[in-house]
Image (cartoon, rainbow, N blue to C red):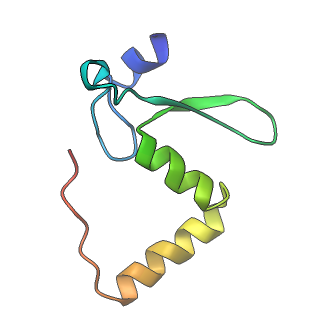
Amino acid sequence: MEIAQEQGDVCPVCGAPDDIATGEGLHVDHCHDSGAVRGLLCGACNRAIGLMRDNIDVLRAAISYLERQGAKAPSLH
């Protein structure tokens, strides 16, 4: 798929590989308002963005919350 090649066959958020062999391929991410494809994400990142309602302000608030709590960023793939 052309998008996967443009992204280096990894999730652009966390760096997880597009591992078709294990069935953990990348998922098509799209805007729920326009239907436009934004890219390919791993299942976890795709779900996380959806659960945050595709809302940048909510995502920023989640980051701020984690920073206040002293959460450490895990190493990316």
Q: Nearer the viewer, residue 40 or 43?
A: 43
Give left or right: position of 74 versus 18. Answer: left
> Residue at image x 60%, y 59%?
51
> Residue at image x 18%, y 57%?
75
Give x and y (percent) for residue 18: 32, 26
Give left or right: position of 66 versus 48. Answer: left
* Residue at the right extreme of this rendering: 33
Give x and y (percent) for residue 60: 54, 70
Quadrant where the N terminus is found in the figure: top left
Q: Nearer the viewer, residue 75 or 22?
A: 22
* Residue at the front extreme of this rendering: 23
Give x and y (percent) for residue 30: 65, 35
Give x and y (percent) for residue 48: 51, 55
Task: Residue 54: name its quadrant.
Answer: bottom right
> Residue at image x 45%, y 48%?
45
In the rendered view, tell whether residue 72 sits above or below residue 51.
Answer: below
Number of numbered discs? 0
Quadrant where the C terminus is found in the figure: top left
In the rendered view, tell whether residue 63 sits above or below residue 53.
Answer: below
